[in-house]
Amino acid sequence: MSSERRSKMRIFLDMLNSIAKKGGQAKPTHIMYGSNLSHDRLKSYLEFLLEKGFIEEILEDERMLYKITERGKKFMQEFEKIEEFSNAFGIDI
């Protein structure tokens, strides 16, 4: 197991991937476990993703769900391009 820490960008991508894997919307606990975060970190990172318009909150059956937006999907696509570029030059992001 690597002792390297994930960058915030990588964490945001992991969170968005967790939502995408659940069909585009997910409960906070699924995001937390899927991206390996503590509850406190999850809350602050969800706030950031909401502020940036990458996700939106949906109240369904009195439960809060988080849905990935088109902007969030675009972020995931662009991050993948950046990752390919950085890997081509042996640079970690």
Image (cartoon, rainbow, N blue to C red):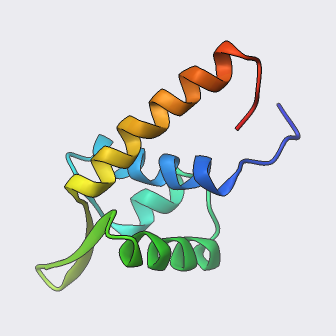
- Count up the numbered dots: 0
Could you tell me if residue 34 is visible in this image?
no
- Give me the residue at 85% from left, 41% from top: 4
- Give me the residue at 40% from left, 69% from top: 28
Q: Position of residue 85 (x, y in %)?
A: 58, 22
- Give me the residue at 84% from left, 33% from top: 2
Q: Position of residue 24 (x, y in %)?
A: 22, 51
Apparent side of residue 13 relative to residue 86 in the rendered image (left or right): left
Q: Quadrant of residue 86?
A: top right
Apparent side of residue 21 relative to residue 91 in the rendered image (left or right): left
- Which quarter of the rendering shows the N terminus? top right
Q: Position of residue 56 (x, y in %)?
A: 25, 72
- Give me the residue at 36% from left, 36% from top: 77
Could you tell me if residue 20 is visible in this image?
yes
Q: Is residue 63 above or below residue 25?
A: below
- Which quarter of the rendering shows the C terminus? top right
Seen from this angle, which residue lies furthest bottom? 62
**In front of the other: 83 or 64:** 83
Q: Is residue 84 above or below residue 4?
A: above
Seen from this angle, which residue lies furthest top? 88
Apparent side of residue 70 relative to residue 4 in the rendered image (left or right): left
Seen from this angle, which residue lies furthest left? 61
Q: Position of residue 45 (x, y in %)?
A: 54, 71
